[in-house]
Image (cartoon, rainbow, N blue to C red):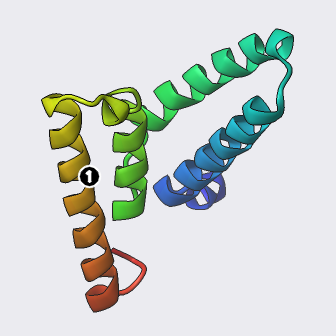
Amino acid sequence: MAAQALTTPASAWNTAFSKYQNLLRRLEQAQPHDAEPINVALATLQDYLMTLPAPSFGALIHKLDILFETDLTKPDRDGDEKRLVMADLRHLATDTHELVGPQA
């Protein structure tokens, strides 16, 4: 019972996302021959993050950033539309955060 109380959805998300961010930093600094295992670990963490409930708008935005990763850079209508939706979501999250506080 005590272990369940310590592993809340928010703490599971925060732990996994922190590991994900650390791997991204490692990948940025990695030599080409060291990148493959980091990419595999990143893909595994991305899959895991997608299975976790998003505990906040910020987490949801991160999930969508991961999901739309390559689409957001496309210079076509699909990329434009996804960038607009993500901008809308970021604005809504900011507005909600200002009204409700960090629990949103």
User: Does 1 sit left or right of 50 as displayed?
Assistant: right
Amino acid bearing label 1: Met
Q: Residue at x 19, y 61 (%)?
A: 88
Image quadrant where one finds the N terminus: bottom right
The residue at which mark 1 appears reads as 86
| Relative image position of residue 30 (x, y in whole percent) | 83, 26
Along the line of sight, the residue nearer the viewer: 71 or 47: 71
| Relative image position of residue 11 (x, y in whole percent) | 58, 57
Image quadrant where one finds the C terminus: bottom left
Q: Residue at x 74, y 43 (%)?
A: 22
| Above/below status of 46 relative to 40 | below
> Tag 1: Cα neighbours inside 10 Å, few (<14), some, or many (≥20)?
some
The secondary element bearing badge 1 is classed as: helix
Q: Quadrant of residue 44?
A: top right
Q: Quadrant of residue 24?
A: top right
| Above/below status of 25 relative to 67 | below
Along the line of sight, the residue nearer the viewer: 28 or 60: 28
Q: Residue at x 74, y 30 (%)?
A: 27
| Relative image position of residue 89 (x, y in whole percent) | 24, 60
| Relative image position of residue 31 (x, y in whole percent) | 86, 20
Residue 104 in view here: yes
| Above/below status of 28 relative to 18 | above
